[in-house]
Amino acid sequence: MPVQDSGQRQAAEATAGDGDSHLHLRYRTLYLMDTPYGSAPLPVWERPEPQPRAAPVSLSRAKIAATAIRLADADGLEALSVRKIAKELGVGPMRLYDYVTNRSELLDLMVDAVYAQIAEAGQHSEWRATVLAIVHRTRDAALAHEWFADLLGARPHLGPHALAVGESTAAALSQAPGVRDIDDLQRALGALNAFMVGALRREITERRTARSTGTDVSDWQAALGPYLTRMLDTGHFPTVARLVIDGAHLDAEETFDHNLIAILDGVTGHPHA
């Protein structure tokens, strides 16, 4: 249900001093839906794209999201702003508000664009192969777009591509041995998501720390080696000592794969040979 809203938009344009403000329509159309709690704006995925206008630079939500992703890949979410995106696109900042009403909607579009890449994992004939393909694709996407991991595990992602990935994952797990009912499926999904979010955030945090400090894991261990040796020599930490002395530095990808298999074996109740 479209309605007209002019006052806030005109005030914002005047405050921002947008050079393209003379190109704006006098009124902005808001699309509302009725809910048990009153009227609420339609989600960004259900709103039609704004009508093209006679402007030097054409815009679309996909184009805005792609630009935002490129900037976030380079500098992180903290450095992302509507003004920076607009400058990159060569338009005034207020033009972007025709397409997204706030930062949350912008992040929603960015996240769903990444889920579109994950959805390319597709369906496989066997449930485990489908889940493995989706999770590995998710790891690839998170390593390519580190900010994506920062947004995992927070509020649900409900864009069309996120829902498609969620459907594929849930449908595959529902076919697993040991998943007998909806409660089993919820627990299996919860365990899988908890592992994936934790593993990806840890791996990406380690990468960021190495970049920001110029020190990798080996350098860090060497710097703290004398202290750790003194502590382990006390004999108070025998199991930690075994891990430090006898344990190898495991490859991140290999560890991720091994632990993912262990999670799937556990949640389905049927170990995989």
Image (tube, grey):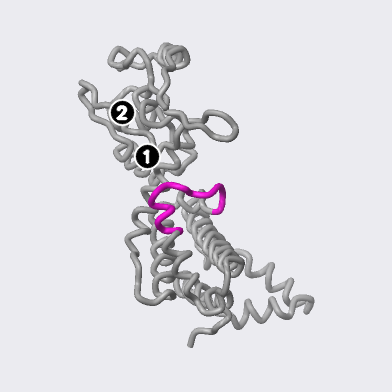
Q: From the viewer's perspective, is residue 196 above or below residue 149?
A: below
Q: Amino acid at mark 2?
A: Pro
Residue 246 relative to residue 135: left or right = right
Q: Position of residue 246 (x, y in %)?
A: 60, 83
On residue 116, which mark appears? none
Compare residues 271 and 185 and report the one nearer the observer.
185
The residue sitting at 57% across, 74% down in the picture is 180
Q: Secondary structure at mark 1?
A: helix
Find the residue positioned furthest to the bottom: 273
Q: Mark 2 — residue?
A: 50
Q: Nearer the viewer, residue 200 or 215?
A: 200
Q: Residue 143 at x, y = what percent?
A: 42, 58
Who's the residue at 54% across and 59% down the image? Answer: 197
Q: Amino acid at mark 1?
A: Ala
Q: Is residue 222 visible?
A: no
234 vs 108, nearest the viewer: 108
Question: Is-magenta flag for residue 155?
Answer: yes
Look at the numbered disc 2 and give the secondary structure of its residue: loop
Taking the spot 35% from the left edge, 75% from the top edge, the residue there is 125
> Would you say the residues marked 1 and 2 are in contact, meaning their CB atoms lie under 8 Å apart?
no
Q: Which residues are magenta?
A: 153-166
First-in-chain label (1 vs 2)? 2
Distance (Cα) linking label 1 and label 2:
19 Å
Label 2 environment density (alpha carbons within 10 Å; few <14, some 14–19, many ≥20): few
Q: Is residue 250 magenta?
A: no
The residue to which callout 1 is attached is 68
Residue in front for this viewpoint, 254 or 60: 60
In the picture shown, does residue 261 fall above or below 150?
below
Query: Residue 184: x and y, percent?
Result: 59, 70
